């Protein structure tokens, strides 16, 4: 399956970074720093380490703007993957000989990898599915209220939620079990 062409903003941003435009780095930081910090924190469980990784990731991007290959996907997904790899490497280094057992470190790495895959899936899915999931999970709306907000039928809202959840379930690696339920909030009255 061919990867869709990245948004124009991504290509232009890469070109601006390659020309050494400091303003481009500032714009990129404003747009993605919270994502980088959140992913790094998810792996490291430490604000100072996440801050350091955030600085290092943007430093790497500034020094290596051509490392991003637009034909392989969006700039956002590349930055997320870069952050994930860097944070996992840092975690393994910091825990080597530390208080955590290798099994505990790998469990944290696995959890962070699953979260990163889920984030990538949600940001890559079609907007109608993403919007339905966000209304159901962030806004805590049932499918009926989500349908009203989206301006679609109840059946269409349920279809979008079901498809979005099916895509999201692929974030779990084969054989991985998760205790949390992905059931959306139900409307009162048993629907």
Image (cartoon, helix red, strand yellow):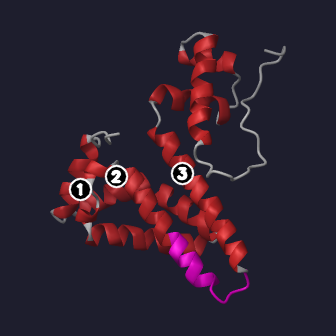
Q: Quadrant of residue 111?
A: bottom right
- Answer left or right for 141 relative to 50: right
Q: Are marks 2 and 1 in contact (CB under 8 Å)?
A: yes
Queried whether the magenta region covers residue 96, the answer comes back as: yes
Q: x, y (%) of residue 90?
A: 53, 77
- Residue 4 lies, with reference to residue 120, above or below; the image says above
Queried whether the magenta region covers residue 133, the answer comes back as: no
- Answer left or right for 76 relative to 66: right
Q: x, y (%) of residue 145?
A: 67, 18
Which residue matches tag 2? 75
Q: Which residue appears at 27% of the width and 41% of the height?
A: 5
Q: Residue furthest right?
A: 189
> Which structural element holds mark 1?
helix
Of 54 and 89, which appears nearest the observer?
89
Q: x, y (%) of residue 156?
A: 58, 14
Instruction: For marks 3 and 1, give the CA distance.
Output: 23 Å
Q: Earlier in the sequence, mark 3 or mark 1?
A: 1
- Answer left or right for 2 relative to 187: left
Q: Which residues are magenta?
A: 87-100
Q: Which residue appears at 51% of the width and 75% of the height?
A: 89
Residue 134 shows up from this direction: no
Q: Decide: few, some or many residues near mark 2? Use Cα within 10 Å; few <14, some 14-19, many ≥20.
A: many
Quarter of the picture holding the C terminus: top right
> Which structural element holds mark 3?
helix
Which residue matches tag 1? 14
Instruction: For marks 2 and 1, give the CA distance.
Output: 8 Å
Q: Which residue appears at 64% of the width and 36% of the height?
A: 138
- Residue 72 lies, with reference to residue 60, above or below; the image says above
Q: Residue furthest front?
A: 175
Which residue matches tag 3? 117
Q: Main secondary structure of the magenta part?
A: helix
């Amino acid at each position: 399956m061919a990867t869709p062409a990245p948004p124009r903003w991504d290509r232009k941003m890469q070109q601006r970074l390659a020309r050494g435009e400091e303003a481009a780095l500032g714009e990129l930081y404003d747009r993605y720093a919270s994502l980088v910090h959140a992913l790094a924190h998810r792996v490291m469980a430490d604000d100072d380490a996440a801050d350091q990784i955030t600085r290092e990731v943007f430093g790497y991007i500034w020094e290596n703007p051509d490392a991003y290959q637009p034909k392989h996907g969006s700039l956002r997904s590349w930055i997320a993957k870069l952050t994930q790899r860097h944070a996992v490497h840092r975690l393994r280094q910091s825990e080597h000989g530390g208080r955590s057992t290798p099994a505990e470190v790998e469990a944290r790495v696995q959890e962070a990898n699953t979260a990163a895959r889920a984030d990538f899936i949600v940001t890559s899915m079609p907007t109608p599915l993403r919007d339905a999931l966000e209304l159901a999970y962030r806004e805590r709306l049932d499918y009926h209220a989500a349908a009203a907000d989206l301006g679609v039928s109840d059946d269409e809202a349920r279809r979008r939620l079901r498809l979005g959840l099916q895509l999201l379930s692929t974030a779990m690696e084969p054989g991985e079990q998760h205790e949390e339920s992905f059931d959306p909030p139900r409307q009162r009255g048993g629907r």
